């Protein structure tokens, strides 16, 4: 993989030697240099071209931004974290992207303070991998307007990685492709993916999610990124290439010298990501006269047996825009009815969505992620809270069976086009409490106790619903007064709470697996007489039981 990246880098710095010379030139002109840790100090730091220690590397050798920073260092801003909107676009970082890097640094500082992750390292990797999410082309939630995909990893000029996600993230069910602004291979994302913007999803095309995942990846093990050797090892674990390390190090040092915030979508975009041209510079500015010209790629392909794999073109081939019939335009409800279920039961209705193209027709092979959100323990079949499936030829896809948990109330299920910025389709689901339409004692023993004593026999009842056992049904037990409008009695038999206090109403009682409920001990006070105990179920079933307090016969 490292050798592949070396070939990719040569498009921006013809050979490793040229990259090294460029770094030296930067150092000589007060630009950021790439000071590498000694190879002798790291067991996992090897030369470019050797195999990494872990094949779940984050990057997929994406042929994106590998140029070194301009020779002119931006003016160093003050110590404020709110960087000014000033300076050239080249030295700026789009607002949402910069916010994502800083949020990731703060999050990891609270969970793994010993790592000492600097946000400038995330910015350096984001610059190299995707030109800061294509110059900050993200929506309000930080998701790229379209997926950022690396080349197909089919062994032709890049590594060979067979599909690991069924095309859910990269749209390729044969081989993998690196995905998102931080260029995660799908199998690596499955392990390291994070929810950086707290929306309940882990999306590699979201800069907040991707930046936090990259931070955790760089902090793996016991690394202390304030140490040069550990920082080098972390970057090499991302892409095991010394050329890659030098380039990331250069941008890292560059951003540490100072940068500034630019509006989203106005950052400098590499030609390979912007149809061959960078966006126009800000009005009133001009390119730095001392910025180095990009070396031309070597026109001669590598020869067989020359120590490198198959040659690659110096620029990626242009991709024609997708046809309207192949463009996802909308995701809509495909006729899903009301979603209601009793606690513990499966929802009879299945959630179904339909993907439409720009012509309003069905669109197949669209990856859709269904996610359960809210205060609920409901889950899809198999115990999952999120599942990703693909639409069929009719453009529809149906979520697995949804099963209610024990938590009652409403929750939400969202369906989104995976990796797209289309609005989610939201469904409200309701879980009702288990019910019983009948409740009765399991025996007919008289319940008596002497004044000041406890009732010797326990009260046991059984609940049913439509003749079947009603398990897990909520029951309320209350000592009541006589009359047409009974109220809680303030004398006579009583229960005790956990602190030994007298109570005459018990809630949060539930029938067990066979529908029965055995009440706690009942105590008599000093007042003799006949009293009533009422038990009411969720669903309205009621039984009234007599309790007698009398002195024992002489």
Image: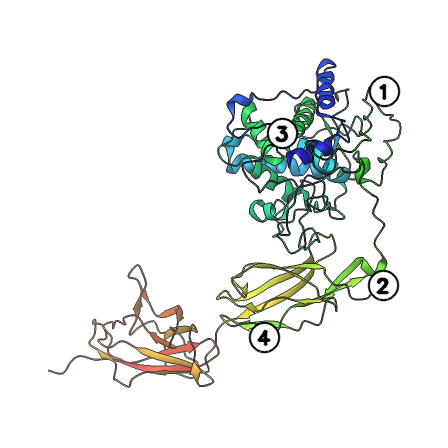
Q: Judge depth for marks 3 and 4 and give the one in front.
A: 3
| Residue 525 image position (x, y, % from top left) | 25, 71
| Residue 157 image position (x, y, % from top left) | 72, 40
Image quadrant occupied by the N terminus = top right
Q: Of helix, strand and loop, which one carries label 3?
A: loop
Q: Judge depth for marks 1 and 4 and give the one in front.
A: 1
The numbered mark, 3 or 4, whose residue comes first in the sequence reads 3
Image quadrant occupied by the C terminus = bottom left
Q: Of helix, strand and loop, which one carries label 1?
A: loop
Q: CA distance from mark 1 to mark 4?
A: 68 Å
Image quadrant assignment for residue 363: bottom right
Q: Of helix, strand and loop, which one carries label 4?
A: loop
Q: Of helix, strand and loop, which one carries label 2?
A: loop
How packed is label 2: few (under 14 Cα within 10 Å), some, or many (20 or more)? some
Determine which residue is flagged by label 2. Answer: 359
**Is any atom of residue 43 visible in this view?**
yes
* Residue farthest toward the front in the current orientation of the protein: 305
* Residue farthest toward the top in the current orientation of the protein: 28
Q: CA distance from mark 3 to mark 4?
A: 57 Å
Determine which residue is flagged by label 1. Answer: 289
Determine which of the numbered discs, if any, sits on residue 348 in the image: 4
Determine which of the numbered discs, if any, sits on residue 48 in the image: 3
């Amino acid at each position: 993989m490292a050798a592949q990246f070396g070939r990719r880098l040569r498009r921006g710095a013809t050979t490793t030697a040229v990259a090294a010379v460029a770094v030296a030139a930067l150092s000589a002109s007060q630009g950021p240099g790439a000071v590498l840790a000694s190879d002798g100090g790291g067991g996992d730091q090897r030369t470019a071209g050797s195999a990494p220690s872990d094949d779940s590397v984050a990057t997929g050798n994406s042929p994106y931004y590998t140029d070194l920073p301009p020779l002119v260092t931006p003016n160093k801003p003050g110590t404020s974290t709110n960087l000014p909107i000033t300076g050239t676009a080249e030295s700026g970082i789009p607002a949402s992207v910069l916010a994502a890097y800083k949020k990731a640094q703060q999050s990891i500082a609270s969970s793994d303070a010993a790592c000492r992750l600097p946000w400038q390292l995330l910015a350096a990797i984001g610059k190299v991998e995707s030109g800061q999410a294509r110059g900050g082309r993200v929506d309000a939630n930080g998701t790229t307007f379209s997926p950022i995909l690396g080349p197909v990893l089919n062994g032709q000029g890049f590594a060979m990685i067979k599909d690991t996600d069924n095309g859910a993230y990269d749209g390729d069910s044969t081989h993998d492709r690196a995905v998102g602004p931080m260029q995660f291979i799908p199998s690596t994302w499955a392990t390291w993916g994070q929810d950086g913007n707290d929306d309940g999803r882990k999306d590699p095309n979201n800069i907040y999610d991707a930046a936090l995942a990259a931070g955790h990846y760089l902090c793996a093990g016991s690394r202390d990124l304030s140490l040069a050797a550990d920082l080098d090892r972390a970057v090499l674990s991302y892409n095991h290439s010394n050329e890659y390390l030098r380039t990331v190090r250069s941008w890292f040092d560059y951003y540490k010298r100072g940068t500034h915030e630019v509006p989203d979508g106005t950052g400098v975009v590499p030609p390979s990501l912007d149809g061959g041209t960078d966006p126009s510079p800000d009005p009133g500015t001009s390119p730095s006269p001392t910025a180095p010209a990009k070396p031309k790629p070597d026109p001669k392909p590598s020869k067989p047996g020359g120590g490198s794999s198959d040659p690659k073109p110096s620029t990626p081939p242009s991709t024609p825009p997708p046809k309207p019939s192949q463009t996802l335009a909308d995701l809509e409800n495909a006729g899903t009815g009301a979603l209601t279920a009793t606690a513990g039961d499966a929802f009879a209705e299945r959630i179904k969505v339909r993907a439409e193209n720009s012509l309003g027709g069905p669109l197949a092979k669209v990856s859709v992620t269904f996610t359960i959100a809210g205060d609920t323990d409901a889950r899809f079949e198999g115990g999952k809270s999120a599942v990703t499936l693909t639409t069929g030829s009719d453009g529809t896809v149906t979520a697995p069976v949804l099963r209610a948990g024990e938590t009652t109330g409403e929750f939400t299920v969202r369906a989104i086009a995976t990796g797209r910025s289309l609005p989610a389709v939201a469904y409200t689901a309701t879980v009702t409490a288990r019910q019983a339409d009948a409740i009765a004692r399991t025996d007919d023993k008289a319940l008596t106790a002497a004044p000041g004593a406890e009732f010797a026999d326990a009260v046991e009842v059984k609940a049913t619903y439509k003749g079947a056992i009603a398990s897990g049904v909520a029951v309320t037990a209350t000592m009541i007064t006589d009359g047409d409008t009974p109220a809680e009695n303030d004398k006579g038999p009583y229960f005790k709470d956990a602190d030994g206090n007298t109570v005459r109403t018990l809630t949060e009682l539930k029938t067990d697996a066979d529908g029965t409920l055995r009440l706690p001990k009942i105590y008599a006070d000093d007042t003799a007489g006949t009293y009533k105990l009422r038990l009411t179920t969720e669903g309205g079933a009621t039984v009234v039981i007599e309790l007698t307090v009398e002195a024992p016969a002489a």
